[in-house]
Image (spheres, grey):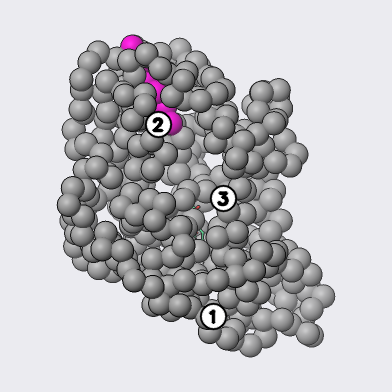
Amino acid sequence: MAVAFVEANLRHVVSGEVEPSLRFAGGQSSADERLEAFDVSGYAASHNEVYPQPARGSSGISPYIRHGMLSLRQVWDHVADGPPRDVAKFRTELLWQEYARHWYARLGHRSRDGVMHRLDGEAKNGWNRAMACMELPLDELEEDGWLVNQTRLWLASQWAVRQGARWQDGEDAFFRHLLDGSRAANRLGWQIAVGVGASKHYGFSRWQVEQRARNLCASCDLALDCPVEDWPEEPPLIRIRRSSELTATADPAVATGPSKPAATGVPTAVWLTAESLGMADPALAAHPDLPAVFVFDEPLLGKLQLAAKRLIFMTETLAEIGAARPLEIHLGKPSEILSGVNVATTFAPVPGFAVRAAKIRPVVVHPYRWLTEPTNGTVASFTEWRNSVVLPA
Ligand SMILES: Cc1cc2nc3c(=O)[nH]c(=O)nc-3n(C[C@H](O)[C@H](O)[C@H](O)COP(=O)(O)OP(=O)(O)OC[C@H]3O[C@@H](n4cnc5c(N)ncnc54)[C@H](O)[C@@H]3O)c2cc1C
């Protein structure tokens, strides 16, 4: 049904075939099942494993976290009774996600070209599918819309550090395919991998493939002439002046939203965004009797040309919401479709929300579900940020 919906209504704003992810179904029920099935035991030792697939210890819940079906706090609590070493490692990864959101909320579009260094690159494809360590993740990216963290690092490093392709184009290529694609985590991940957002870059070589994808090299046509046999050369990073916003901001609420519901009127509908597609979304939960409304942003999607998998995933999710309460789905410009409608919504810490909300003027804005309370302190590095915030119990 979702495939037919996307084919009929959204074909003109997606790229490639209209096919669902081979691995992930949308919907709150799928999110709940995935989380329920996830056992954190062994995570510390196995979360970086790539191949064969059964060796992987990562949870595969990121698409559901991305779209608000699972909150970081819920996932944090889910693993509470696991082995302490595994719980600590897993929770550190959740904090990376939280950090990416604070980082992007603070910097927005200013994060586009790197926050610590600049790295110029050529407009070209930086991936060679003849390499088994590229082909395996690229197939997954295109068919499943998902990658483990380790292969994201391999692909990013190969693209920009070894091949000298423009890293922002690689970021966009990921964004087009990933079901969990977010400007926050994707951009931060690329910046760390290629070194523009960190003090050093991630160096990709055959060594990691042999460690994390046992026997993959044996199937590679280039095994005897491996292009990543040795450590890569240092990329030509150019130091830039860091934005003062990285270390402090005057008013964190501007970028991170209200800490309690902010109301100026009585809502007649709940406006759902791509960040708030969970059944426990604060605005949905606070107004159970109101219809929900979602707008596929036609101008934006037309520009992004995402792979259809993402929109199929979102449509499946919306279908579950629509089975539980009245739901309208529109295609067009959110500010025009919602003009004059008194909506309640949940804050989203992304620049696109701020732009649309300024025109739509929601009458109630519910707080975003942060894992750690936003502060006006540093987001300059993960470690500095983590040391400055209060972690959940
Ligand atoms: C180049 C690059 C691009 C990335 N793009 C995205 C993206 O668009 N969206 C996205 O959600 N994550 C992104 N990540 C982070 C990470 O790779 C994915 O979150 C993770 O692989 C998702 O798989 P999982 O749910 O099995 O993770 P698990 O290992 O099971 O971790 C649980 C959760 O912790 C969070 N997490 C784990 N590792 C990271 C990390 N390094 N940074 C931020 N959050 C993390 C995710 O929410 C994840 O679902 C990127 C990383 C890199 C290096």
Q: What type of secondary structure mainly makes up the magenta span?
A: strand
Nearest to the eye among marks 1 and 3: give it.
Answer: 1
| Residue 71 horizontal/vertical position (percent) | 36, 42
Q: Could you tell me if residue 20 is visible in this image? A: no
The residues tagged by marks 3 and 2 sit, at their Cα atoms, a distance apart of 21 Å
Q: Nearer the viewer, residue 69 or 272?
A: 272
Residue 175: which disc? Answer: 3
Residue 235: which disc? Answer: 1
Quadrant of the rendered image containing residue 346:
top left
Residue 19: which disc? Answer: none
Q: Residue at x 17, y 52 (%)?
A: 250
Q: What range of the chain is rendered magenta?
A: 268-273
Q: Answer few, some or many: residues within 10 Å of disc 2's Cα (few below 14, many 20 plus, some between 14 and 19).
A: some
Three-letter residue code for mark 1: Pro
Judging by the rendered image, the residue that carries numbered circle 2 is 356
User: In the rendered structure, does residue 95 fall within the stretch colored magenta?
Assistant: no
Label 2 secondary element: helix
174 lies left or right of 346: right
Q: Is residue 335 above or below residue 65?
A: above
265 lies left or right of 46: left
